[in-house]
Image (cartoon, rainbow, N blue to C red):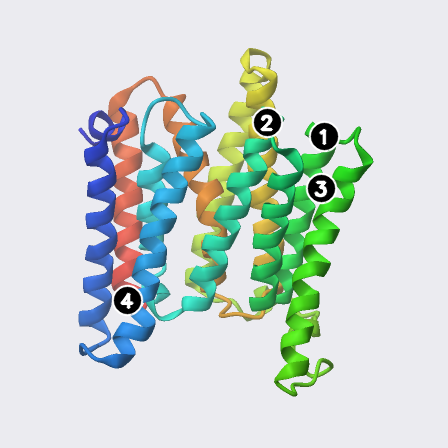
Amino acid sequence: MITSVFGKSKPINFILCIGILLMYFVIYLFSSNKSIGLEMLTVEVPVVLLLLFSLFMVDFIVKKNELTQQNDFALFAFTLLIGVFPNIFAHIKVVSILVLALLAFRRIISLASLKSIKQKLFDASLYITLAILLDSWMVVYFGVIYLTILVYVSSDYRNWLVPLISFFGIIGLFLVYLYINDKSILTNQLFQFDIKINYLETDFRRILLHSLFTLLFGLNFVIFLLKIKTYSSQKKISFLLTKMLFFTGAAYVLFAKNNTYNTEVLLLFPAGFFVANLLENIENKRISDILLFLLMIVSFLFNFYSK
């Protein structure tokens, strides 16, 4: 039944995903005894708006670049996996980083058209640099940008310089801001790379979450190897970039300065893609329904019992 609903791309599916996200928000408000006030309007509400925008971005990226077939599995999985982070509505910085990463990947993946190459590289680098201002370790995402250059447009040496121009331009403006406001550049957190693996401070819930992401990646890697001969060159590149996005997100999770539990939201987009690809390769709809139902159960269990 679930497969028949999200197995075809329809506007109603996007509305359903919005409803699920808002339901998570209501659960968060009741579970944390939040009252309507200035704090909620300045923290939780902006996070909800950013998450709603992230749903739009995921839907746009997947459909515009044909990362999956004509279905909404990736969007549905992305929405359900947000529920794994019940306290995400209190972490505007992490959600802002997620949105900036999605905006960057939107420009990166669209390089396949080979149009407006330098503008897209500049935009993607700009978004990542803005994310770096929130957490220095987001610099690892420049690896995705340079991998894309290597795959698509490596012949023009100027393309390799565009990300650096964007990066130093934004950093230069930020330094001017610090100077005007009499803030020390040396003590600013932007320039502090704390070499500390956050996984050493993990718990059982986080291990379960990472096990889920690892399982999704492993199953997709097996499917990719089995069907690689049937994929077009563009499909192979899309898989490569998405997997690179996953590994980069995993590296960020290990070193990020932010809350160690919520940084995993950076893995939601590739995880949603993995779920969609897995379901597309299952011919038996009953099995697909069971898998989606299990994902829903996992999402709700995390949402209710991970406070």
Q: Nearer the viewer, residue 140 or 187?
A: 187
Above or below — where is 284 with respect to 126?
Answer: above
Q: The disc labelled 1 sits on which kind of residue? A: Val
Across and down, in percent, residue 289 comes to 25, 30
Neighbor class of circle 2 (other Cα within 10 Å; few <14, some 14-19, many 20+) is some
Instruction: Give residue 153's mark.
Output: 1
Q: Label 2: which residue? A: 112
Q: The disc labelled 4 sits on which kind of residue? A: Val
The mark lying in front, picked from 1 and 3, is 1
Across and down, in percent, residue 145 comes to 66, 43
Question: Disc 1 versus disc 3: distance between alpha carbons?
Answer: 10 Å
| Residue found 69% across the figure and 59% down from its top | 169
**Mark 1 or mark 3: whose residue is earlier in sequence:** 3
Neighbor class of circle 3 (other Cα within 10 Å; few <14, some 14-19, many 20+) is some
Instruction: Give residue 146's mark.
Output: 3
Q: Is residue 194 visible?
A: no
Q: Label 4: which residue? A: 45
**Mark 3 or mark 2: whose residue is earlier in sequence:** 2
Above or below — where is 160 with respect to 31?
Answer: above
Q: Indicate the secondary structure of the residue bearing disc 4.
A: helix
Question: Disc 2 versus disc 1: distance between alpha carbons?
Answer: 9 Å
Q: Indicate the secondary structure of the residue bearing disc 3.
A: helix
Q: The disc labelled 3 sits on which kind of residue? A: Tyr
Question: Disc 4 versus disc 2: distance between alpha carbons?
Answer: 36 Å
Question: Disc 4 versus disc 3: distance between alpha carbons?
Answer: 35 Å
Q: Is residue 6 left or right of residue 128?
A: left
Q: The disc labelled 2 sits on which kind of residue? A: Ala
Neighbor class of circle 4 (other Cα within 10 Å; few <14, some 14-19, many 20+) is some
Q: Indicate the secondary structure of the residue bearing disc 1.
A: loop
